[in-house]
Image (spheres, rainbow, N blue to C red):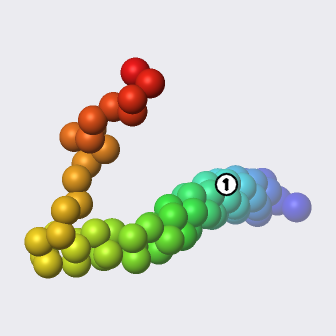
């Protein structure tokens, strides 16, 4: 194999290795984003319910605004 072809092969192998690493890193990002999406999809109905209650003028207080339990 002449020197030029050898260098080209090494260059291609190097780029392939970097691309494989980048694909794996992107896969991890997509995986983490899917976990976040699943979390927010689970919380969305609860948030909508609270928002609807607020729009109807119902009491939707924050936990920090409530009096502490009697045993404190």
Q: Position of residue 42 (x, y in %)?
A: 50, 71
Q: Quadrant of the C terminus?
A: top left
User: Which residue is at 44% across, 67% downward?
Assistant: 43
Residue most toward the right? 1
Residue 19 falls in image quadrant: bottom right
Which one is in front, 51 or 8? Answer: 51
Q: Secondary structure at mark 1?
A: helix
Q: Is residue 27 visible?
A: yes
Q: Position of residue 16 (x, y in %)?
A: 70, 62
User: Which residue is at 39% across, 70% downward?
Assistant: 46
Q: Position of residue 2 (x, y in %)?
A: 82, 59
Q: Is residue 60 left or right of residue 7?
A: left
Marker count (numbered): 1
User: Which residue is at 57% across, 58% downward?
Assistant: 32
Q: Is residue 6 left or right of residue 60?
A: right
Label 1 neighbour load within 10 Å: few <14, some 14-19, many 20+? few
């Amino acid at each position: 194999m002449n020197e030029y072809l050898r260098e080209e092969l090494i260059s291609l192998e190097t780029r392939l290795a970097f691309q494989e690493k980048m694909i794996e890193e992107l896969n991890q990002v997509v995986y983490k984003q899917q976990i976040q999406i699943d979390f927010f999809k689970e919380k969305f109905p609860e948030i909508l319910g609270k928002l609807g209650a607020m729009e109807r003028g119902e009491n939707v207080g924050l936990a920090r605004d409530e009096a502490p339990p009697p045993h404190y």
